[in-house]
Image: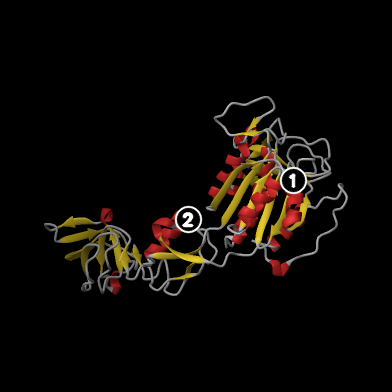
Amino acid sequence: MIDNQHQVDYESDQTPEFLHSINKALEKLISLAKVIDSTQLIELDDALNRILAVDIHANISVPSFNNSAMDGYAINLKENQINTPGKFVFEITDRISAGNTVSILEPGCAARIFTGAPIPNGANTVLVQEECKVIKNKFKIKVDRPILLNENIRPIGNDIQSGDVILSKGKQLQPQDIALASSIGIGKFEVFNKIKVGVFFTGDELVKPGNTLQQGQIFNSNRYLLVALLNKLSCNIINLGNIKDTLNATCDALETLKSNCDLIITTGGVSIGDKDYIKPAIEKLGQLNLWRIKIKPGKPIAFGNIGHCTFIGLPGNPVSAMVTFLLFARPFIKKIQGANHYLNNALKTQTNFDWHKPKPRCEFVRVCLDHTTFPAKANIYTKQGSNVLSSMVWADGLMEIPEKTTFKKGEILNFYSLNEMLS
C-alpha cells in the first residue's frame, strides 16, 4: 500500500549509470508505506505473530493479592522478633493453600502456606519450609536464624499495576505477550488484518519442481522462496504462479491482482533486457518510482504503484531476490502491517577475512559466525555469486561491506542475522 498523500520527488535516473543509495532507497520506500487501517478481533490461540492494533491496559493488578512465593510458613512476627538473633518457636494455627480465602494470623503464630496462596492478615514474612523444623507433634515450628520482614512475599501489583500499558500498539505478538495478556483476563486481541500480497513469476525458462528439465530450462526456486518469505510474515498470498514472458501477459497479471491486493511482488523482469517486461508494464498501468540501487547482489529493483496497490519487483537471481526482499520488501511489509519495529537491526561484528579490492557498490556478503572465539568472528562464503543459493543455507547472516572499501581481518562491520530477519 502506497501513501499517495506523501509522494516524494525522485532524482532523475535517465542514464544507466545512475544508482540510488541503499539508505535513500529504503527511506523512500518506508516513507511511502501506509499502515493498513482495518482490524479484527481474534482469539488468543490465533494471535501468534499478529500485529496488535491497540494498546492493552491492565484493568487489574497482578498479583491482585499478597501471596507466597514459596512453600513454607507465613509468620506474624512480633516487633521484638524482627532480625534479632536467637531461636524462635511459632505455633502452627492454620493451613493455607492456593485458592483459599484470606484468614487472620495472630502475633507470634505461623500458618502452613503453599506457593501462590494468599498471605493471611497479620502475616509479615514467609519462611521457606526447609529452614523450619517441625516440633511438638507437628503443632509448632522452630527457626534458628534471624528473620526479616517480607521474606518470600509477592506484594499486590508486583508484576503489573492496574492501569499500566502492558502491550503497545504495533507489537508483533509472541508467546510471552499472549501469556501476559491472559494473566489480566484479556480474552481476545484487536489486531491489524493480514495484508494481501499478489505474486507471479516471469521467465519462459522456469519449470515447476517435479517436472523434467529440457535443454536451457531451470527449476523455479524463486516461487517457493518468495511464498515462504511472505508466509513468514503472516501475509495472505494470491499466487498466479508462472506467466508467459510477454508484455501482455505481464499487464494481465498486474490487472488481475491490483484490485484484490495491498501489494504485488514479483521476481525477475526488472532489468533492461529485451524480455524484461515488468518495468514497461508498470509504467503503462501505473507509476514506477525507483528501480536501480547501489547494492550487490540485487541492483535492479522496481518499486511503484498501480492505483492504490503497491508494486515491488525483485531481481531474478535467487540470492539477489532473497537479499533484496529482506533488506527492502520486509521492512516495507512490516510497516504497512502496523508493526512499530520494522527496520532490520545490525550487530557490530568482526570480520575473519580480508577485503582487498574496493567495489563500486555496497555488498552484502554471506557469512557464518565462528563462536569458538570471543567475540564471534564472521567467516565469508567462498562463492558469492547471486546464483549460489547454497550460500544462503550455509550463512548465519549478511555482512555489509561499504562501497570503495578495503580492510584486513578484524574490521568491525554491520552484521544482519538471518534468524532475526526471518522472524
| Viewer can see residue 356 | yes
Quick one: SS at disc 2? loop
- Give how far across and how far down residue 147 sits, in percent: 32, 64
In the depicted view, which residue is nearer to us: 260 or 378? 260
Structural crowding at the residue carrying mark 1, measured as other residues with C-alpha within 10 Å and reported as few (<14), some (14–19) or many (≥20): many
Q: Nearer the viewer, mark 2 or mark 1?
A: 1
- Give how far across and how far down residue 68 sits, in percent: 30, 63
Mark 1 — residue? 277
Corner quadrant of residue 410? top right
In the depicted view, which residue is nearer to us: 99 or 149? 99
Q: Is residue 353 above or below residue 331?
A: above
Q: Is residue 323 above or below residue 258?
A: above
- Give how far across and how far down residue 286 sits, in percent: 73, 58
In the depicted view, which residue is nearer to us: 111 or 309? 309
Question: Which residue is farthest left?
Answer: 137
Corner quadrant of residue 205? top right
- Residue type beneath disc 1: Tyr
Which residue is depicted at the point 36% across and 71% down?
156
Question: Which residue is farthest top?
Answer: 215
Q: How many marks?
A: 2
Q: Quadrant of the N terminus?
A: bottom right
Mark 2 or mark 1: which comes first in sequence?
2
Mark 2 — residue? 174
| Viewer can see residue 151 | no
Label 2 – label 1 distance at C-alpha = 41 Å
Check residue 78 in the rendering and tell me which mark sits there, or answer none.
none
- Residue type beneath disc 2: Gln
- Give how far across and how far down residue 366 sits, in percent: 68, 38
